[in-house]
């Protein structure tokens, strides 16, 4: 009997510390989780991600931040865009037009569209889009652009692509443009730098009115650049310009004209079931014309200014490997 009693006391002595340890561990588990003791990790909120400096994303890895976006949409995404442009024209009156277009990414790294709203590009003149209504100075329909862009290089800091744009002449001239756009993403964690070198073939001389015997086949060589800064994840500012040699091969007595466009703008990004940018831009097409033909001054700001108000709407991937 004494042996049994001693054995019971010995087992109790061994079990007691273990029970104490488990008893001490249980409150710790409860404090790591929620009030009910659930210790599953909750996903970080958008506010917490912003505080930690993490880039906000709309879907997958497509950024909300305007300055962090790739040069093409993610595979399966669709974009619709519209803009209202008012500007100056030579002579009396003003120019005004409504442009509506869109784009889609059918496969990874490829974007095709009927629009002029390419990421990182200097704004195109108004009156060019899939559906364009020109209200003044004379009512008409605008030209239709068709473009394809392939992004063939991407890393944490740089994006490089190639563009091919055709403008079908419903109102002005047929043009075909090949470009090499480059985006340096948030340099020094501050601003994104955009640049592009473009070669354009034009059938129909834009300076024909100033040249006695113009050629219908001319070329333009343009280098454009700009910068975009996100003040917050949703608000951004942008500025840009460039320099171009236009009317190359314009005919007997034609001058190679230098044009310098310029613009400033900004916008706000709404994030919900869709990603929408609402923006405004002010600029000159061009600000300065060097070696201008007769009848054109170096600065024609009264004729070349424009103001644009517009919006772009991005959907989540509607097809492909990232469909949602």
Image (cartoon, rainbow, N blue to C red):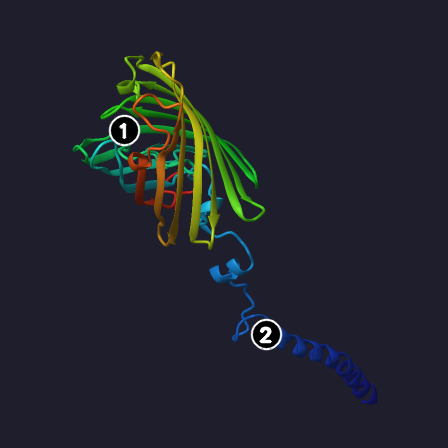
Up-down: is 259 above or below 250?
A: below
Q: Position of residue 246 (x, y in %)?
A: 39, 22
| Residue at horizontal 43 percent and vertical 26 percent from the top | 244
On screen, 166 above or below 18? above
| Residue at 77% in and 84% down | 8
Give the tally of numbered discs: 2
**Residue 75 percent location from the top left of the image:** 42, 38
Judged left or right of residue 315, residue 321 is: right
Question: Which x, y percent locates residue 32?
Answer: 59, 70
Can residue 314 be seen here? The reply is no
Residue 243, label in figure: none
Identify the residue shown where x is 51% and y is 63%.
42
| Quarter of the rendering containing residue 78 | top left
| Rendering quarter of residue 9 | bottom right
Answer few, some or many: residues within 10 Å of disc 2's Cα (few below 14, many 20 plus, some between 14 and 19).
few
Discs 1/2, front: 1
Which residue is depicted at the point 28% across and 33% down? 129
- Circle nearer the N terminus (1, 2): 2
Outermost residue to the left: 139
Closer-to-camera residue (271/255): 255
Asked whether residue 38 is in view, the answer is yes
Which residue is denoted by mark 1 in the rendering? 144
According to the picture, the residue beneath numbered tag 2 turns out to be 31
Provide the secondary structure element on which disc 2 rests.
helix
Q: CA distance from mark 1 to mark 2?
A: 63 Å
Query: What element does badge 1 sit on?
Result: strand
Q: Farthest bottom residue?
A: 2
Does the CB distance between marks 1 and 2 fall below 8 Å?
Answer: no
Q: Is 319 placed above or below 141 here?
A: below
Q: Nearer the viewer, residue 174 or 147?
A: 174
Which of the 4 quarters of the picture holds residue 220? top left
């Amino acid at each position: 009997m004494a042996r049994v009693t001693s054995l019971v006391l010995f087992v109790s002595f061994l079990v007691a510390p273990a029970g104490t340890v488990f008893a001490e561990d249980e409150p710790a588990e409860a404090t790591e989780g929620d009030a009910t003791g659930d210790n599953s990790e909750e996903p970080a909120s958008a506010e917490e991600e912003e505080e930690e400096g993490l880039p906000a994303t709309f879907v997958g890895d497509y950024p909300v931040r305007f300055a962090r976006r790739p040069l093409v949409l993610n595979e399966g995404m669709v974009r619709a865009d519209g803009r209202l442009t008012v500007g100056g024209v030579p002579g009396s009156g003003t120019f005004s037009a409504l442009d509506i277009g869109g784009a889609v990414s059918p496969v990874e790294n490829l974007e095709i569209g009927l629009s002029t709203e390419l990421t990182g590009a200097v704004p195109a003149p108004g009156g060019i889009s899939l559906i364009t209504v020109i209200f003044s100075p004379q009512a008409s329909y605008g030209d239709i652009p068709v473009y394809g862009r392939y992004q063939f290089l991407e890393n944490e800091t740089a994006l490089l692509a190639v563009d091919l744009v055709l403008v079908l002449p419903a109102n002005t001239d047929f043009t075909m443009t090949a470009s090499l756009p480059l985006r340096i993403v948030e340099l020094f964690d501050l601003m994104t730098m955009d640049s592009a070198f473009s070669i354009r073939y034009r059938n129909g001389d834009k300076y024909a009115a100033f040249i006695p015997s113009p050629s219908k086949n001319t070329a333009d060589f343009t280098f454009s650049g700009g910068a975009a800064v996100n003040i917050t994840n949703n608000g951004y500012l942008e500025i840009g310009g460039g320099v171009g040699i236009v009317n190359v091969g314009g005919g007997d007595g034609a001058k190679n004209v230098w044009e310098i466009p310029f613009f400033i703008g900004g916008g706000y990004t709404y994030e919900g079931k869709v990603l929408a940018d609402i923006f405004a831009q002010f600029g000159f097409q061009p600000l300065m014309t060097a070696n201008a033909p007769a009848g054109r001054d170096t600065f024609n700001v009264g004729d070349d200014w424009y103001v644009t108000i517009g919006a772009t709407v991005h959907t989540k991937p509607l097809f492909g490997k990232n469909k949602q």
